[in-house]
Image (cartoon, rainbow, N blue to C red):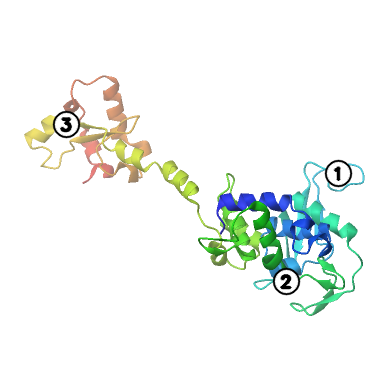
Amino acid sequence: MIADDLWAKLLWAGLNLDPGDLPGGSGAHPGAMVRAVTLTWLFAGQRSDEIARLRLGCIRWQHDQPAVGDDPQQTDSSVCLIDIPTHKTGTAFTKPVDPLLGRAIEAWQALRPAQPPMLDRKTGEKVHFLFAVRAGRISKNYINDTIILALCRKADIPSADVRGPITSHRARSTIATQLYNAKEPMTLFELQAWLGHRSPESTQHYAEITPNTLAKAYNDAGYFARNVRTIEVLVDRDGATSGAAAAGEPWQHYDLGHGFCSYTFFEQCPHRMACSLRLLHSQRVQQKPTSASEIEPSADARQHPTHRR
């Protein structure tokens, strides 16, 4: 994947890329097509070959509410869908993308000159490619050789980092990782469907857990608080000094917040929500015992399975 700070700069550069930023200037390729290719790489999370093989009319809009006027994009609840062609790990599928990408592709489609159908070597069909001009489609290396280098220059960042050159495929891993670590993250299976993988094992190679997400999960697990709670106990000193503890009598009583329990592994006890001993202890604590030795289990409670050692 690509570091978040570098990726943010690449996104900024892509949103502000001009045809003049490319080698050869504005005459190399139409500006609308360059913008559409760039945003597809930055937002779609697809391989370069799949981007180059996108079909004309691959963008569709789904609405929960009727569109406003003649523009199908002008609703707050519009969902932009893109049709991905057959790829190396599966058949064609459809997935949601940011509406910004949908608008950029439709802007290029409106300006795209008519092109003859061309052979899709993956499927053997003759199709109308989206990113085609002068009777030829862009190559799968166009993003690596042209777009990424132009974005790096505009963003004033090196074209390589500690992991190696910034390539088209690393964007796929970066987007997957960000979706997996978002505030409202995609599940592994949702991400699998979005990436077009056949199995979740493939998706696991793309979705990395970031240090921030791992730190939050660790804090939420409450490891320290959980272990500190076991320290908060009432010790029956009389039982300990008299030798009753050595004979197997309970001498530590763990404060569970609404009662006390003498079972060392109380968190694993299946009876902890309905424990007569805990209720007995809770009632005695409310009576403010003068010493921990006053908190003694009844004869029946001693037979409870949660208090066996």
Q: Which residue is mark 1?
A: 66
- Which residue extends farthest left? 242
Q: Amino acid at mark 3?
A: Asp
* Viewer-nearest of discs 1 and 3: 1
Closer to the chain start, of discs 2 and 1, is 1
**Is disc 2 in contact with disc 1, using a CB cutoff of under 8 Å?**
no
Front residue of 14/297: it is: 14
Dividing the picture into quadrants, the one containing residue 303 is top left
Dividing the picture into quadrants, the one containing residue 285 is top left
Q: Which residue is mark 2?
A: 86
143 over 257 or under it: above or below:
below
Front residue of 206/139: it is: 139
What is the x, y in percent for residue 87? 69, 71
What is the x, y in percent for residue 196? 66, 64
Dividing the picture into quadrants, the one containing residue 198 is bottom right
**Residue 116 bears which disc, if any?**
none
How far apart, in angstroms, are the residues tagged by discs 1 and 3? Answer: 72 Å
Mark 3, secondary structure of its residue: loop
CA neighbours of label 1 inside 10 A, class few (<14), some (14 to 19), many (20+): few
Tell me what residue is drawn at x 79 percent, y 54 percent.
Answer: 102
- 78 left or right of 280 in image: right
What is the x, y in percent for residue 194? 66, 59
Q: Which residue is mark 3?
A: 236
